[in-house]
Image (cartoon, grey):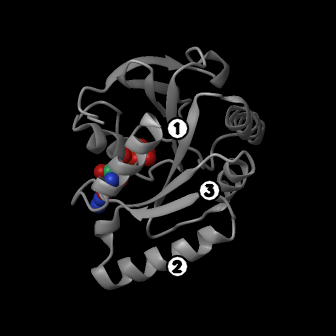
């Protein structure tokens, strides 16, 4: 699949306002600042497709992109801001778990985690929900360039072991938007999901 022609389609304030549940889609989720926008831009070879470094705490939208007709990438809002009030967080988590449970076109979930702080609380919740719903997951350990090759490799191996605890179909790869580590593996997995 060629990701370069990917285009922005629409923004939705709520998961219930997403486009019709037809075709296939892959969702991207991660804590704020995990490098999700950068990863989307890297994947699609577009500098400004997903905005990077948004103001923390601001209400964010779900952005919908189309790689080609009927094949979408869904950019979910970053989570984990301390400043977001608890009821807002709870509402969002409920909407997210509903989306994972009910969305027919969802073929896979990419969870981005900073390689220096993997598996934080909400990351684990998401992994549980996704595997419970039998949605395949690709965990990307982002900003892999921040670690030297030795620690990078050992972190990857540890993260793969940790993924087994969740029991589902979980693939773990490293990723760097800066050096493009893991880009090929990521493209391969997402292409596979979007074309199956
Ligand atoms: P988002 O909030 O998850 O969309 O994260 P962004 O893509 O906006 O990235 C957050 C910060 O991390 C920005 O300052 C980026 O420049 C930086 N960043 C993102 N990806 C990488 C990467 O692969 N390597 C390094 N060193 N920094 C990155």
- Cα gap from disc 3 to disc 1, whole angstroms: 14 Å
Whole-percent x, y for residue 150 in the image: 33, 85
- Residue 9 sits above or below residue 73 on the image: above
- Residue 133 sits above or below residue 5 on the image: below
Circle 2 crowding by C-alpha within 10 Å: few under 14, some 14–19, many from 20: few
- Residue 102 sits above or below residue 82 on the image: above
Give the residue number, with chain letter if any, for mark 2.
158
Q: Quadrant location of residue 142?
A: bottom left
As rendered, which of 135 and 56 lies closer to the eye? 135
Circle 3 crowding by C-alpha within 10 Å: few under 14, some 14–19, many from 20: some
Whole-percent x, y for residue 79 in the image: 58, 45
Circle 1 crowding by C-alpha within 10 Å: few under 14, some 14–19, many from 20: some
- Residue at disc 2, CB closer than 8 Å to ligand 1: no
Give the residue number, with chain letter if any, for mark 3.
123
Give the residue number, with chain letter if any, for mark 1.
27
User: Counting residues from the N terminus, which is met first, the one under dot 2 or under dot 1?
Assistant: 1
Label 3: which secondary element: helix
As rendered, which of 178 and 189 lies closer to the eye? 189
């Amino acid at each position: 699949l060629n990701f370069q022609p990917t285009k922005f389609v629409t923004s939705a304030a709520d998961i219930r306002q997403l486009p019709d549940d037809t075709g296939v889609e892959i969702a991207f989720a991660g804590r704020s600042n995990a490098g999700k926008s950068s990863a989307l831009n890297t994947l699609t070879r577009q500098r400004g497709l997903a905005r990077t470094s948004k103001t923390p705490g601001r209400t964010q939208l779900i952005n919908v992109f189309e790689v080609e007709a009927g094949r979408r990438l869904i950019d979910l809002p970053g989570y984990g801001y301390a400043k977001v009030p608890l009821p807002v967080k709870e509402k969002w988590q409920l909407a997210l778990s509903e989306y994972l449970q009910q969305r027919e076109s969802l073929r896979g979930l990419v969870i981005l985690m900073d390689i220096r702080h993997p598996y934080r609380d909400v990351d684990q919740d998401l992994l549980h929900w996704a595997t419970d719903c039998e949605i395949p997951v690709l965990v990307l350990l982002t900003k892999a360039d921040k670690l030297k090759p030795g620690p990078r490799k050992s972190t990857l191996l540890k993260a793969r072991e940790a993924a087994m605890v969740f029991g589902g179909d979980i693939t773990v790869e490293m990723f760097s938007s800066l050096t493009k580590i893991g880009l090929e593996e990521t493209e391969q997995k997402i292409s596979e999901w979007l074309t199956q």
